[in-house]
Amino acid sequence: MLEGMQVKKLKIFESESGSVLHALKNTDKGYKEFGEVYFSTVLKDSIKAWKLHQKMTLNIIVPVGSMLFAFKDARNESSTYNQTFKIILSQKNYCRITVPPFIWFGFKGLSKELNLLCDITDFCFDPKEILRKEINEIDMDWSKE
């Protein structure tokens, strides 16, 4: 994993009538403050990459489907500068991943059905603080972990 990132195993509470999937409490490590929650979908084998937030901290969860995430550290002062990290999130590996600013990231849909990402951020989206690159600008093997 990259310096400053956190992966937290989350609980799923099963019942006969349906499940409750935990996401984030304001007392959890990784929580800074509340900005907004957004959802993003990605089709099977489609890739959405690359984005880097200069200020925003992300708390990413995949409650539906399965998605491969890839990260590359762009922080010069980091002990993991220029290193990469990949992880698959799904209900089988139901985790929240906290991503600090200045880490490039992208994701790929793995399930045939809906692949849904939930992101809980520490402030509202600002198009001026996000950087983008084309998928081929960062070398990444998008095969599974």
Image (cartoon, rainbow, N blue to C red):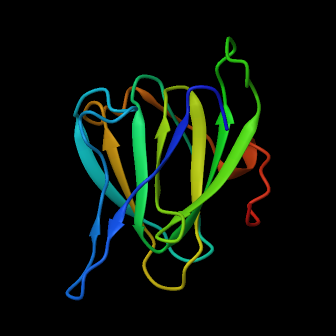
Residue positioned 25% across, 42% down in the render: 25
Residue positioned 46% across, 70% down in the render: 91
Q: Nearer the viewer, residue 77 or 128?
A: 77
Residue 137 in the image: above or below residue 106: above
Quarter of the rendering containing residue 56: top left
Count of numbered tags: 0
- Quarter of the image for the C terminus: give it: bottom right
Q: Is residue 129 left or right of residue 80?
A: left
For this orientation, the residue located farthest to the bottom is 16
Q: Is residue 36 left or right of residue 111?
A: left
Tell me residue 55's x, y (percent): 41, 23
- Quarter of the image for the N terminus: give it: top right
Q: Is residue 81 left or right of residue 52?
A: right
Look at the image and tell me whether residue 48 can be seen.
Answer: no
For this orientation, the residue located farthest to the top is 77
Residue positioned 77% across, 50% down in the render: 140
Tell me residue 101's x, y (percent): 49, 26
Residue 140 in the image: above or below residue 44: above
Tell me residue 103's x, y (percent): 58, 32
Residue positioned 23% across, 41% down in the render: 36
Look at the image and tell me whether residue 51 can be seen.
Answer: yes
Tell me residue 20's x, y (percent): 25, 69
Residue 69 in the image: above or below residue 92: above
